Amino acid sequence: MTSEFSLFKPQMQYAPYACLAETSRGRLYLEKETVTRSPFQRDRDRIIHSSAFRRLKHKTQVFVYHEGDYYRTRLTHSIEVSQIARSIARVLGLNEEITEALSLVHDFGHTPFGHAGEEALDDLMKPHRGFDHNAQSLRIVTRLERRYGGFDGLNLTWETLEGLAKHNGPLCRDDDMSHIHINFLEYNREHDLELHTYASLEAQVAAIADDIAYNNHDIADGLRAELFTMDEICEVPLVAEIVREVRDTYGDLDERRFDHEIIRRLINRMVNDILTESSSRLTQLRPESVKDVRQAGRRMIAFSGEMKQTDRELKVFLMRNMYRHYKVCRMTSKAKRVVRDLFALYMEEPECLPEKWQERLTDLDEQDRARHIADFIAGMTDRYALMEHRRLFDISMFEL
C-alpha cells in the first residue's frame, strides 16, 4: 500500500520541536558567530574540513579498500546517510543543517577494516576500559582534531555534540554512569551533555537514516560481490514483494538496473514508513519544544512494528550470507591480525610510532598510553594500516 507521504509536500517552516540555531546552548569555548552561516552550518563545515572526514575515504565497512572501487567506504556511506536524513528532516519540519552535520560526523570514530577492526581494538583495550567507535567520534571532535589556535577539537555546538553522543538513545538512566565509556565521561565533566535523556529529533533521524543506508547498501555491495543472489534475499517478504513489483513494471531488466530498482524502492518504503510512524508518535506526544522530545522517555523517530520486523530480517540475512561469508571472514581474520600486531608492537616499542605521536606519550601511565596508541590505530585508513604493517613486519621491506 502506498504511504500518504509518497506525494507529501515538505514543510517550509520549522516545527516547534525542531532544534533551532538561535536557541543553541553554544560552544564550550566562546567564539564569535558569523553573519554568513548559522552555528549548525559552521559545525557541518568544520566536520567536512577536518582530517577525520577526509580519512573516511579510505575506511571501509565490509570490503577492504583494494577489493574494488564500487564498494561503499565510510565517506560515501556518510554522504548517503546525510541524503536520506535530510529528506526525512525536511518533511517533518526539522532542522536540516544539524541533521546533515550529525550524519556526516557519526562514523568518525570507526577503525580501519570496519567492525572487524573495532572488535580487535576493543578486545585489546579491555584492560584499559575498552574501545567504542561512538565514544571515539566524540573524542576526535573534542580533543584529537588539532586545527584551531584557541582550543583542541572542533568546538562544535552543544546540540551537535549531544546528538553525536546520544543518537542511539540515552547512555544511562538518571545518575548511574558506571557503564559509560571514559571518553563520554571525560568530556561530560566539562560540558554536560545530559547523557540520561534522549537526543533531539534531528539526531534520531540521523541514527535511523544510518540504519537504512547500512542495510540497503550492504545488500547492493553483497549482490555486486556475488556473495548472494536476489532470489536468495527474497526470503525477506518485503524484498520479494518489491521484486514482483519491478518485474511486473519492467519485465526483464539487466542485472544492474534491476538490483538498483529494488534497493531504491526498499529505501523509499523505509523512509515512508518512518514518516508515517514518527508523525503518529509526535501527534500522540504533542511536544512543544525540543526539551519535550528529550524528556519523552522513548524514541519519536522510529519504524512501525511491521517495518522493524523487516529490518531485523534483513540484518539476519546479511549476517548469515554476507558478514559470515567465508570470503569476508578470511579478510576479517587478516584485518584483526593487522590491528593486533600493530597494537602489540607500539605498546612494546613506542619508538616505532611517528615522532609527533611519540612526543605525546611523555609521562602517560599504562592506561593512557594504551588509549593514545588506540587513537593512532583507530585513525588509520585501511591502506595506511596495511602499509604500516608491511613496514614493521615484512623483514624484506626496509623503506622508512
Image: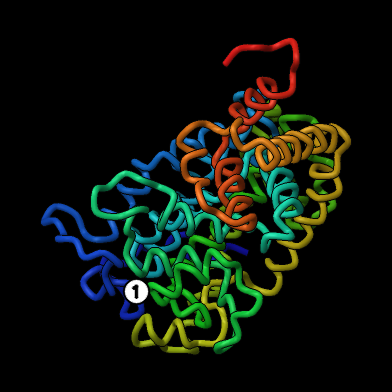
Q: Nearer the viewer, residue 20 or 115?
A: 115
Q: Residue at x 42, y 89 (%)?
A: 286
Left or right placement of residue 61 versus residue 195 in this view: right
Examine the image and state in which quarter residue 102 appears. Answer: bottom left
The C terminus, quarter of image: top right
Q: Residue at x 24, y 48 (%)?
A: 149
Q: Nearer the viewer, residue 250 or 325?
A: 325
The N terminus, quarter of image: bottom right
Q: Is residue 43 above or below residue 263?
A: below
Viewer can see residue 344: yes
As drawn, the residue found furthest toward the front would be: 363
Q: Residue at x 46, y 57 (%)?
A: 85
Left or right placement of residue 137 versus residue 15 in this view: right
* Crowd around label 1: few <14 · some 14–19 · many ≥20 (10 Å): many
Examine the image and state in which quarter residue 341 appears. Answer: top right
Q: Nearer the viewer, residue 44 or 180?
A: 180
Q: Position of residue 220 (x, y in %)?
A: 67, 38
Provide the residue designation for mark 1. Answer: 18
Q: Is residue 87 above or below residue 94?
A: above
Kindly state the secondary structure of the residue where label 1 is placed. loop
Q: Position of residue 342 (x, y in %)?
A: 69, 36
Q: Is residue 288 above or below residue 96?
A: below
Q: Position of residue 310 (x, y in %)?
A: 73, 62
Count of numbered badges drawn on the protein: 1
Q: Position of residue 308 (x, y in %)?
A: 69, 68
Viewer can see residue 247: no
Colour basis: rainbow
Q: Residue at x 50, y 78 (%)?
A: 195
